[in-house]
Image (cartoon, coloured by chain):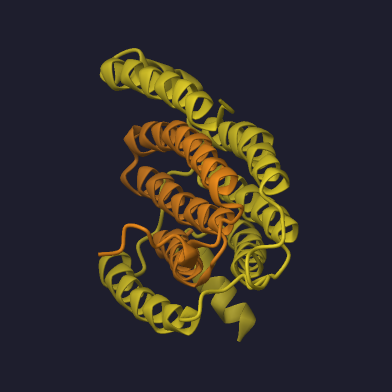
Amino acid sequence: MLAANFLLLSAVIFCIGVFGVIARRNAVLVLMSIELILAAVMLNLVAFSAVLGTIDGQVFTLFVIGVAAAEVGVGLAMVLMVYRNRRSIALDELSEMKG
Amino acid sequence: MTVTVAAVLAADGINIAKNVGFGIIAFGMVFAALCVVSTRNIVHAALWLVVVLGGVAAQYILAGAEFVAVSQVLVYIGAVMVLFLFGIMLTRAKIGSDEGMFNDGWALGIPVAALLFGLLGWVIIDYAGDDVIANQTPTPTVMLSDAYLGPFLIPFLALTFVLLAAAIGAIVIARKD
């Protein structure tokens, strides 16, 4: 297989995720777009692991899986707290800290 | 024409069956990812995300990373998706003024994403070109465990503390006082 196959696929998924982070208004959907970005990065790491013939990319991928799980847990807890305080998770309404 | 292309690919040592499988899975993943960022139903977005993450696991197997693929299925499709569905369930109410799922300036995301993809694609083609992945035999899990209990032991232990802190932090943040 061509190495560029994996890399181009992960670039496409990454860009779709970036679009989701910019366009979406609901905080949970933004977290899902961040998951898309992380999946693209992990695919990239595994692809480089295969290209270079070393194990390090896969080791890093498992680290990223662990950190992403922690990120989702804390992120959703924060979304839940915002919802409980404001009855809304629309991101454009969270503007208290705007200067 | 197809036969010629197939012959050239075979002569290069490129496995055609794997390429066809890659193409099918990649098409499904891109379609599902577009659905994740464009559908108006949150639960449907979560279910399309399952398709993307399952496709990523399949690509890991194609790249010879089987342990990572199984971990991906366990952690993402097993745990993270349940967390997302609970998050949707607990925050689902009529949002403020309207039910809009998109920001006012959502169209700005299209040129940003297109520009980013152009840049990334250019760099990838320039770097990888027509490099072929030579060795695609599955990685023995023993190599991974040797890496974790050898040179990566300290980061591994640090990750356990990160997970512990995240679990405690999530409970503290989300608890009702």
Q: Residue at x 60, y 86 (%)?
A: B1
The percent coordinates of residue A95 (x first, y second) are 39, 62
Can you give x and y, in whole percent of width and height, for residue A5 in the image? 47, 64
Task: Choose between A16 and A45: the one closer to the eye.
Answer: A16
Q: Residue furthest top?
A: B149
Q: Nearer the viewer, residue A31 or B117?
A: A31
Residue B107 visible in this rendered orientation of the protein? yes
Q: In the image, B104: left or right of B32?
A: left
Between B86 and B32, the one nearer to me in the picture: B86
**Colour yellow maps to chain:** B
Left or right, residue B82 beside residue A51: right
Can residue A9 be seen here? The reply is no
Vertical side of B171 occupied by B146: above or below:
above
Identify the residue at image location x=31%, y=19%.
B158
B3, above or below A10, in the image: below
Tag count: 0
**Palette colour of chain A:** orange
Residue visible at 58% across and 62% down in the picture = B19
Residue A25, by quadrant, is bottom right
Looking at the figure, which quarter contains the C terminus of chain A? bottom left
Q: Is residue A80 above or below residue B48?
A: above
Residue furthest to the bottom in view is B1
- Percent x, y of residue B59: 57, 50
Classify B79 as above or below A23.
Answer: above
Q: Position of residue B16 (x, y in %)?
A: 60, 62
Q: Residue at x 57, y 31 (%)?
A: B71
